[in-house]
Image: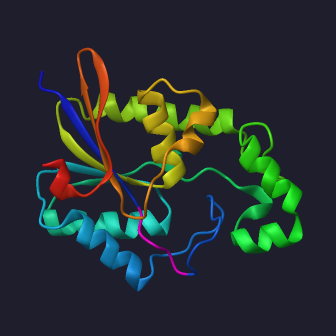
Amino acid sequence: MPDTIIDLIRHGEPLGGRLYRGHQIDHALSEKGWQQMWDAVGNYSEWQHIVTSPMKRCSEFAQQLAGKLSVPVTTEHDLREVGFGSWEGRSREQIMADNLKEYEDFYRDPVNCRPDGAEPIADFINRVDYSWDQIIKEFEGQHILVVAHAGVIRAIVAGVLHAEPVGMYHIKVDNAGMSRIIHGEHGSILHFHNTSIADMT
């Protein structure tokens, strides 16, 4: 059986700019965000299937790309972004102005000092890990694209690297940044991270 090649792409910039959105705020991509996504994928056409988060900032692009490439697309509910609770829909500046200590505590210890009402990090990792395992099984031997969020991609990459949960927060994922994971008989290897398709081929 050939290796399974899984490319991951984070959504582009959404409407409203930089906010904590999690999975309660479902903004579509901005014009800039759409351009970032098309620029990121270029004319690449090797994907056999696309899997996407249900959030508009991912799914709308996934559907359009799938139509362009004439490949199937699957929506995976557990690939939605980590829940940020009371921070959702707010900017970094707003949160710092209202509760600087909560903001500083989170970035000092993001595993244990979550925003009020935020999804526990263990719950988030468990659902992403479950979804990842299902993707590996369902698309064995294929080359697929997963359209998701920064938190989801961090969780997947951290899992491949066997990093502790706090390690997620030391992984940078740009808008429309792409990563590649190759899964074979001996497990998964991170091949590229946060780059462009030109560097991945």
Which residue is found at the position 33% from the left and 73% from the top? 36
Residue 124 visible? The answer is: yes
Which residue is found at the position 72% from the left and 49% from the top? 107
Q: Residue furthest bottom?
A: 31
* Residue 13 among those drawn in magenta: yes
Quarter of the image holding residue 157? top left
- Left or right: where does residue 192 sit relative to residue 75? left
> Magenta segment, principal secondary structure?
loop
Q: Residue furthest top?
A: 186
The x and y percentages for residue 172 are 48, 51
- Left or right: where does residue 116 sit relative to residue 191? right
Say if 64 sits above or below 80 in the image: below
Viewer-nearest residue: 98 or 181: 98
The x and y percentages for residue 97 are 84, 72
Quarter of the image holding residue 176? bottom left
Magenta segment, which residues? 11-15
* Residue 67 among those drawn in magenta: no
Residue 90 visible? The answer is: no
- Left or right: where does residue 100 sit relative to residue 194? right
Which residue is found at the position 88% from the left and 70% from the top? 98
The x and y percentages for residue 121 are 68, 38
Say if 108 sits above or below 70 in the image: above
Which residue is found at the position 75% from the left and 40% from the top? 109
Viewer-nearest residue: 77 or 29: 29
